[in-house]
Image: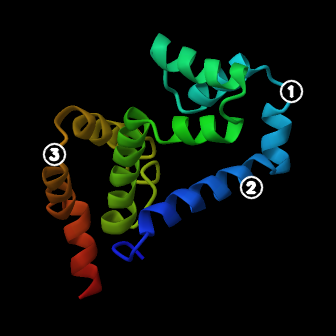
Amino acid sequence: YVGAPGWQQILEANKKTLVEKWLERTDFKVLYDGKSNAQYVDALFGNMSQTPNGNERDGLLATLDKGSQSRGHVLLQVSENTRYRREDYNAAYVLVHYFGYLHRNPGDAPDNNLAGYNFWLNELNHTGDYRSLSRVFIESGEYKDQVKRKK
């Protein structure tokens, strides 16, 4: 657990083990084994809808081409990319509010599209104000109606 002696080393070892096992998955192999190192790096970033800066991409590619790092290490580095983690976190944060407060998927009725979800995700990405987003959901008529029905 976090705080126990050596927890950071255990976490890093577990992440490496997970990534190496992930690379052995049949679906992963089908997608990536036939790719060159450049195609592999580009595909990883493409799947995250990210455009790496030139140095970032070239650095990862160089480590693969030199054999100083494995594809697993590159996958881990790309997945721990700060921009990606922030965007992924924000998307999950908004989605959890739909599930937790409104008890529905964002595209379900009454919206029947993702306009509301996309609006709140864009707001959060722009402002970074997590507390205000939560407050909007808590104060929404849809949430208040659900609370009334449960009483």
Distance from the alpha carbon under mark 1 to that under mark 2: 18 Å
* Residue 151 against residue 31 in the figure, above or below: below
- For this rendering, which residue is in front, 104 or 12? 12
Give the amino acid type for the residue marked by disc 2 in the picture: Lys
Q: Which numbered mark, 3 or 2, is in the foreground of this view?
A: 2
Looking at the rendering, which quadrant does residue 135 occupy?
bottom left
Image height check: is 26 above or below 103?
Answer: above
Mark 3 belongs to which amino acid? Asp
Q: Earlier in the sequence, mark 1 or mark 2?
A: 2
Q: Which residue is mark 1?
A: 34
Q: Position of residue 110 (x, y in %)?
A: 38, 53
Q: Amino acid at mark 1?
A: Gly
Q: Nearer the viewer, mark 1 or mark 2?
A: 2
The picture quadrant where one finds residue 151 is bottom left
Q: Which residue is labeled 2 in the image? A: 21
Q: Residue at x 22, y 58 (%)?
A: 137
Question: Label 2 crowding class (10 Å Cα cut-off): few <14, some 14-19, many 20+?
Answer: few
Helix, strand or loop at mark 3: loop
Is residue 17 shown above or below 107? below
Q: Quadrant of residue 147?
A: bottom left
